[in-house]
Image: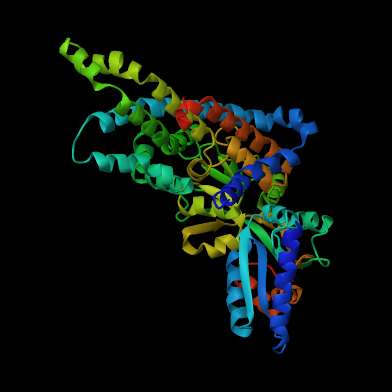
Amino acid sequence: MRGVRLVSVLAAAIIVTGCADDEPERGGEVTVLAAASLTEPFEALGERLAEDYPDLDVTFSFGPSSGLVEQVIAGAPADVLATANTVTMDNATAAGMLAAEPQVFARNQLALAVPAGNPGEVTGLVDLARGELRIALCEPHVPCGAATAALLDAAGVDAAADTLTTDVKETVALLTLGEADAGLIYRTDAVAADDAVEMVEVAESDSVVNDYPIGVLAEARNPEGAQMVVDAVVGELGRDVLGEAGFLVP
Amino acid sequence: MVLLVPSLLGLALLVLPMAGLLVRAPWGRLPAILSSADVLTAVRLSLVTATVATVVCLVCGVPIAWVLARTAWPGRSLLRGVVTVPLVLPPVIGGIALLMAFGRRGVVGGWLDETFGVSLPFTTAGVVMAQAFVAMPFLVVAVEGALRTSDRRYDDVAATLGASAWTTFRRVTLPSVAPGVLAGAVLCWARALGEFGATVTFAGSFPGTTRTLPLEAYVAIGSGDTDTAIVLSLLMIVVSVGILVGLRRHWVGTA
């Protein structure tokens, strides 16, 4: 452990002295851990940021929110955390992983999605209870699964799932491949999947909304760069790309 | 000294993660976790699927091994290549390939679905297929090795005494390589038990039908239930190490 500390101190010293010669540029490397459902808008945001701030080098790592929180708590080197619901972020906050109170920057809703052409002739949430259909839902412990459970509960539907995915993108893939006849995914994923999946309008979907919080991590190696990314996400640029991807923005 | 340092580093890389599990293991909750309904369901499913997959590998793999060891024809090395590909292929790629072939819109799967109404993804049969896909080479390689080192003259003698090819195979060849077949079957079973990538990709993950032990561990770590994930990891390590220790003569060759 002492060896590791020494190496990081040396590395920090090299970085500090390296920068001291130049005008202190705002930038550097920033690693962002983000929920899988943020993949498209954040990648778009990353490209726009790269144009505006050539010195800022943002790397994204997308995955299931609860897994990302696990990684952060286990000491994964990262600067910013953005999750797909507040429950997972609260776990990170409770563990003292955030530098400041996280901000909600977007909201998402679930959508009932079917493969192009709707082979299972799905018309509403009640169809999720049909045993002969192949149904893919999110695992209850990940954010999209928690929202799924809440939505099904609100609609009074006892779904006959055939597979429970730990990542909403897996559900999207199964729908795109036509291996599943219906599934609940985020509205944004349905927008991103374009023509490969169709959305079936569900009245109850308004009743369940996911808040997406973002925050700078307490152990960020580049807190300044991290704050720049967070500002961009909650700012106009973020609202633009997130709105385009189908998110509801505050 | 030059050899000692890297070998110790390598050893540390292999041993420290296991030690980490032991240190973090929730020993007090161990019995409760191991006897929880979710875990028991996954254990039962894993035992059944790995065993069925091993039987499938024995039935199909032993003849393949015989062909590789005892026949000479131009396509033989190609066959060996095909059979051993899953050894080096990332299992998730195997899962994608299985989905493309046996998925509902796959080449074979589409036909199965239309003709018989049979769909393999998301079923326990799909789990067995995924496991057999990745575990088969372990059996074939072990049995082929045993066949190569066994004395062919016994087979020849049996044949000259009038035994048919099938009788010779069943009564002479197979018994002479029985230890190799057993070792291959046990390795094959262990690999099937640990299968994750191909299973989750091809068969999905649902408690009781497709969620085997490794999938249960993955769901546990993904949903923040670290204790269960650690206990399941320990369980898999104990089984794997137990099997390798039991097979040490065949595996390390220190007889």
- Left or right of A54: which side holds B85? left
Q: Position of residue B137 (x, y in %)?
A: 39, 36
Does B20 appear above or below B27? below
Q: Nearer the viewer, residue B51 or A232?
A: B51
Q: Position of residue A220 (x, y in %)?
A: 75, 68
Quadrant housing residue B180: top left
Residue B104, visible in the rendered structure:
no
Location of the N terminus of chain A (image quadrant):
bottom right
> At x 50% / y 47%, what residue is drawn?
A181
> At x 73% / y 53%, what residue is drawn?
A74
Quadrant housing residue A34: bottom right
Q: Residue furthest front?
A: B1
Does B43 appear above or below A61? above
Quadrant housing residue A188: bottom right
Q: Position of residue B178 (x, y in %)?
A: 38, 19
Residue B157, visible in the rendered structure:
yes
Q: How is the image coloured?
A: rainbow
> At x 39% / y 42%, what residue is drawn?
B102
Q: How many marks?
A: 0
